[in-house]
Image (cartoon, rainbow, N blue to C red):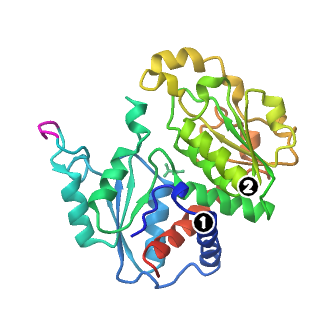
Amino acid sequence: MQHFLSTADWTQEQLDGLLRLAADLKQDPIQDRLRGKSIALLFLNPSMRTRTSFDLGMQQLGGIAIVLQPGKDAWGVEFKSGVVMDADAEEHVAEVAGVLSRYCDLIGIRAFPLFQDWAEDRNDPVIRALAKHASVPIINMETIVHPCQELALMMTLREKLGEVRNRKFVLTWTWHPRPLNTAVANSALLIASKFGMDVTLLCPEDAYRLDSRFESAARDFTDQAGGSFQVTHDIEAAYSDADVVYAKSWGALPFYGRPDEEWELRRKYRHFIVDEKKMALTNKGIFSHCLPLRRNVKATDGVMDSDYCVAMDEAENRLHVQKAVMLNLLGL
Ligand code: CP
């Protein structure tokens, strides 16, 4: 049984197949190929796009989605093994996964890291525990990676650029008032490198580099696919001749779980906002972001309202790629 936990576990050919199926579904969105099928969507964190697009996508293919928010409208869940459950959680992931596997054909989960100990969070323990105990495929709706967002990004890039191999893809850290999850940044590296782009990671200083696991994967994938990978702190060099600028803010991993100390670092870097002047350095590049985005904090109104901003296309494509993932995992 195959899960959709990270695109790192899927070959480029398999991902290409998902994207081709997503393109077909975009042309012919209402079908009954998932009639009688169901998905449980477990949200441990807030969402607008993911929740709407999974629920709607399942309905558009004739199936049913059930949204559950453990700790809010469903019992809180313990994900660790062998613990004495005398804290808040009322049930264990073993039973949650077992019961939902009896009811549903698929389970999706959003479980952001806990922002306490990166050595633990980098192993993605919550979704791994769910996958271990479930007998149906699990879909990652964002943990330490966001593979559905990755597919939507790549679908959008191919729609706008055609062949993406050796096009310059810049992942830029942006300013934000607090340290955020690295998931989308990790994912952007994975997908751009898997498809052979020339990938530049732009961040203010080494403290904002991504986990070595993802930087190494980017290096390996670009080697295999004929692209390249580099890290820079030079804004002008990074934006110069870029075909794609992809923005995201994330927390500095050496200060993980210590936001007050991290603030002393990040407060210097408001100028990492994406603005029209920086975008003018690009090769008539396109701009995107996974959303939600704080305007005039991460990117200016001018960038967000420009013709080269494709964030809305990427958000729409979440719907199409996720339908493709659900069909694929069910072999339909
Ligand atoms: N991009 C994304 O996953 O959006 P939501 O957090 O609104 O689901």
Q: Secondary structure at mark 1?
A: helix
Q: Which mark is residue 196?
A: 2
Q: What amino acid is labelled 2 in the image?
A: Gly
First in sequence, mark 2 or 1: give its number.
1
Would you place residue 218 above or below residue 17 in this image? above
Instruction: Between residue 200 and residue 259, name the one nearer to us.
Output: 200
Would you place residue 241 above or below residue 326 in this image? above
* Dot 1 alpha-carbon crowd within 10 angstroms: few under 14, some 14 to 19, many 20 or more: some
The image position of residue 150, as x and y in percent, is 59, 55
**Per the image, is 96 magenta?**
no
Q: Is residue 140 left or right of residue 224?
A: left
> Can the viewer see residue 289 in this picture?
no
The boundaries of the magenta stretch are 83-87
Q: How many marks?
A: 2
Which image quarter is the N terminus in?
Answer: bottom left
Could you tell me which residue is drawn at 78 percent across and 27 percent down?
Answer: 234
Instruction: Between residue 332 and residue 45, name the one nearer to us.
Output: 332
Q: Is residue 276 left or right of residue 178?
A: right
Quadrant housing residue 320: bottom right
Residue under label 1: 15
Q: Is residue 4 left or right of residue 156?
A: left
The image position of residue 185, as x and y in percent, is 59, 42
Instruction: Between residue 18 and residue 52, name the one nearer to us.
Output: 18
Q: What amino acid is labelled 1 in the image?
A: Leu
